């Protein structure tokens, strides 16, 4: 009894692609286990390194597959020029996201753990990938870094229309801006203890809520 395997099974491009993907998967597993064994780094640093390693491996996979399949892709592109132009137009937003990712990487605009503001959206960067970043959203009030409880996915294409502002923050406390109005003839220094007591009471109610 005899049988023949399909000729594509032994295709060098297919084997090279499979080897590349298996090698990258193995590298990600090894890097992930190495980070888990590290006791001298914080959770935020570990998440930052995990995101960086993942993005680098994805980029290597994309570049490697393009190089492996370049001859076939070149022939296909030449025969479908009009279709390729239509695809570029249809994927304009996707291309802008990839370009925005390159802009963020090369300029080091922000990284995991930073508090950023892009347009009207403000929050702490939780994760970075090739198309967008995930934020833990904060209140839109100036100076406030109080979380709203929502997770926002911010596409990198917004970096070309709105500047990315990295806001200063303290890991030891949460800041919240507010305003107070007093009569012009009130001596504030004589009522410091009263104002402090009111602020402490308001903070206790906020924490309890």
Image (cartoon, rainbow, N blue to C red):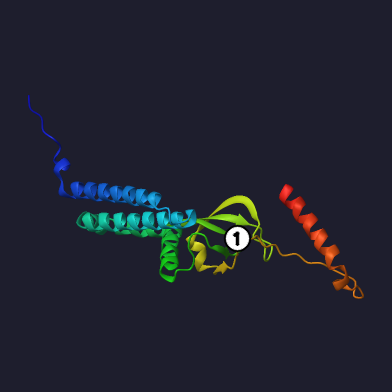
From this view, report whether residue 26 is shown above or below residue 62.
Answer: above
Q: Looking at the picture, does residue 8 appear above or below residue 115?
A: above
Residue 153: percent from left, percent from top: 53, 54
Residue occupying the point 81% across, 67% down: 180
- Is residue 209 in view from this perspective? no
Please state if 2 lies on the left or on the right of 144 as rendered.
left
Q: Position of residue 149 (x, y in %)?
A: 62, 49
Secondary structure beneath label 1: strand
Residue beneath the point at 33% across and 50% down: 28
For the point 15% across and 49% down, which residue is it?
A: 12
- Viewed as shown, does residue 46 lie left or right of 67? right
Residue at the extreme right:
185
Mark 1 lies on residue: 121
Q: Residue at x 44, y 57 (%)?
A: 41
Q: Which quarter of the image is occupied by the N terminus?
A: top left
User: Who is closer to the viewer here, 39 or 186?
Assistant: 39
Q: Based on the displayed image, in which of its 4 quarters is residue 97 positioned? A: bottom left
């Amino acid at each position: 009894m005899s049988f023949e395997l399909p000729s594509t099974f032994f295709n060098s491009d297919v084997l090279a692609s499979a080897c590349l993907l298996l090698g990258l998967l193995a590298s990600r597993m090894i890097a992930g286990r190495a980070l888990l064994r590290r006791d001298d780094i914080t959770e935020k640093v570990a998440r930052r390194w995990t995101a960086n390693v993942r993005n680098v491996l994805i980029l290597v996979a994309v570049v490697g597959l393009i190089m492996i399949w370049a001859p076939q892709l070149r022939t296909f592109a030449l025969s479908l020029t009009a279709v390729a132009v239509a695809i570029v137009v249809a994927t304009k937003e996707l291309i802008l996201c990839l370009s925005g990712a390159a802009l963020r990487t090369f300029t080091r605009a922000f990284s995991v753990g930073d508090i950023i503001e892009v347009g009207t959206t403000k929050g702490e960067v939780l994760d970075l990938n090739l198309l967008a970043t995930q934020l833990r959203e904060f209140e839109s009030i100036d100076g406030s870094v109080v979380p709203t409880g929502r997770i926002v996915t911010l596409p990198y294409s917004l970096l070309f229309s709105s500047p990315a502002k990295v806001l200063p923050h303290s890991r030891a406390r949460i800041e919240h801006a507010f305003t107070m109005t007093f009569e012009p003839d009130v001596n504030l220094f004589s009522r410091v203890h009263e104002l402090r007591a009111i602020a402490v009471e308001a903070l206790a109610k906020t924490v309890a809520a």
